[in-house]
Image: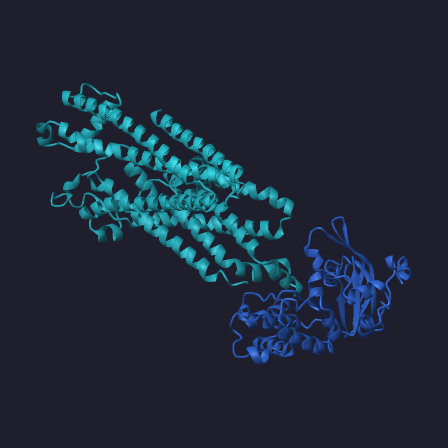
Chain colours: A cyan, B blue
Amino acid sequence: MFNFYLLSSVLLISLIFFFLGNNRAKNLVKLNQKNLHSLTHYYGVYSLLVSLLPALGIFFIFTICDDLIFAELIKKYIPKEVVASKDYNFTIVLAQINNSVEGLIFGTPPKWVTNAAEIWISWIHKSQIITVIICISTALISGFLGYKKISGNFRSRNAVEKIVMSILAVSSVIAILTTIAIIFSVVFESIRFFALIPYDEFLFGTVWNPQFEGAERAGSGQEGLSQYGAIPLFAGTFLISIIALCVSVPVGLFSAIYLSEYATSKERVFFKPLLEILAGIPTVVYGFFAALTVAPFLRSSGSIFGLDVASESALAAGLVMGIMIIPFISSLSDDVINAVPQSLRDAGYGLGSTKNETVIKIVLPAALPGIVASIILAVSRAVGETMIVVMAAGLAANLTANPLEAVTTVTSQIVTILVGDQEFESAKTLSAFALALTLIVITLAMNFYALHVVKKYREQYE
Amino acid sequence: MNNRNDLKSLELTVGDVFSKNARLKARNVNVFYGNNKAIDNVTIDIGSKEVISFIGPSGCGKSTFLRCFNRMNDTIDSCVVQGEITIDDENIYDKKIDVVPLRARIGMVFQKPNPFPKSIYDNVAYGPRIHGLSENKEHLDVIVEESLKRAGLWQEVSDRLQSPGTGLSGGQQQRLCIARAIAVSPEVILMDEPCSALDPIATAKIEDLIHELGNDYSIVIVTHSMQQAARVSKRTAYFHLGKLIEVGKTKEIFTRPQHHQTEAYISGKIG
């Protein structure tokens, strides 16, 4: 609530500066009978941005930093005997104090915890007061400076342009930094995992059988109990992805061809949104569709032919995942097929090709790079898909190429490892990060390859 | 002068629309785009081995009319063609007619060079392949070479038949498109402003080519350039607002136009 009030008042101040700036510009016009460089509202917007942005920046820095600073300062208030004890862990102590600050008290915490929490609360109050003072005064001062700058010669239109450009640039930097941060967080945990388990066992091992056994695996005489060979997981992932592609590539591509080449504009307007609804269905819904409808159906129809279909089979998960990624392929392919110039089709018709010949021999080859790119994007989507496989593919890490058996995938293993209680130092928990890292590397490589394919063939027709 | 033709001109075309050895005959053709009438009651003959040009201001319907002859207007949903067009006395709008072989008999060259994003060889071989015109690979090679020679492109590309057709210059691309049209040995070639995207030198080459091809094919060329019409064609038809205003020998159209609108157009008053 406090933050909300503070932000509203900063916003209010900058709005006031908007009107002040606007009026000052208007008055300049009236008094001097002189033309300003920019339209008057640009002067208003300039004052607004100049007062708002620095205050916002300071606000965010303060909010992010104060917890970090407090955590450092609170160390002084933890009794020496607690720090000295054998199972001391600063993260846990900090969590205890934070719970106490927020009023979540379990049992009777030690006296020093309540004391530390009181101190923490007093710091929060101080920091709030400091934040208010600094934010408001920044807004006022920088707004006033911006306001003072307004004169006939000041080029506020260009200045606003620059500010807007930097806002846009900062937004894209935030997106990039987040990606980098995600990758790094996974990389650091993976390094810890590979300190316990050798690379070659993880990358080339064929048995996946993780057990909780703590960090003392190495040298504890327990070798052989847990095995971290990721190959069955990746094999399962690719088996399911291939089944999914066998469904989605023909269906998606054919419907794209139908929509872009054969459908009348009325049909197109009707069918395309319907197809895209598929993309809007939450994957968890696909998951229970796979587990409760498709899998039993496959099992019963398999038994008619004397086939033994596992109740959780790669086939069921793959089929449903294929349906899920149809819209990715159909929508993107539809776009690239539409981008093939009409003149090429005309040339084909003019030579006496049928519609089908024109599509197969002229339009599809011209659109091929885009279609390949859409398929590769669909593959990375299938590889990263989690919910359907968790619900429908099973958890048994079988190394098999038989789609009727249960397999497991990288993503569903990550989920099962990280759901529920876990000890953070164990190889089992850390293996989730190593799996995630490998998966990220694979999907990134595929996306890069897709972009490369598109780039290489883009200028074919033109 | 204005009074002489004003009333009649709404219905009648000036000049001789008929031809002694007519190959294509259009009778009372109307074309509609939705509710818009694009071509209004046009009757004209196109002779065997004749080069005829269609001229007229932008939007006068000359391209639309051209595309009636190989039924390219079929690809536009809202377009409706009424009337009768015959090739060798066979109505091409008859329900029994298969449009695919028809388009092989009546080739087309478009305004913008549109080679397929394939090799030069495959561009020319496309038509013969889909129509099964060649008995074997050697025969196909012969057809490709022959067509490229007739289009005057063989010397320039004979050493790089496998490089992409899109890599050629604009004028070469357009001659490639002509070679592609010739390869299926059509009887008539329709050309829709074939030089409008080309520079003067490439234009001159294409015009020479049209001149030569006129010995073997009927050629209908739509053009914006009156000089071009004068250079390449024996007969000229002038269209205005969807109506065929005047047809006649090219020389006479440009020197002694009968209709005041034709005169206004060629003297640069409309355009």
Using residue A85 as the reference point, say whether residue B122 is left or right of it. right
A362 lies above or below A441: below
Quadrant position of the C terminus of chain A in the picture: bottom right
B240 lies above or below A195: below
Image coords of residue B95 (percent x, y):
76, 57
Quadrant position of the N terminus of chain A in the picture: top left
Q: Of residues B130 and A182, which is closer to you in this image? A: A182
**Residue drawn at (70%, 79%), measured in percent from left and top?**
B212
How many marks are shown on the rendered structure? 0
Using residue A435 as the reference point, say whether residue A329 is left or right of it. right
Answer yes or no: is residue A403 visible: no
Using residue A354 as the reference point, say whether residue B91 is left or right of it. right
Using residue B214 as the reference point, say whether residue B41 is left or right of it. right
Q: Of residues B255 and B143, which is closer to you in this image? A: B255
A246 lies above or below A16: below
Image coords of residue A452 (percent x, y):
42, 58
Farthest right residue? B4
B37 lies above or below B156: above
**Residue drawn at (53%, 54%), measured in percent from left and top?**
A336
Answer yes or no: is residue B107 visible: yes
Image coords of residue B215 (percent x, y):
74, 78
Farthest front residue? A32
Farthest bottom residue? B155
Image coords of residue B103 (percent x, y):
69, 65
The quarter of the picture where residue A171 lies is: top left
The quarter of the picture where residue A117 lies is: top left
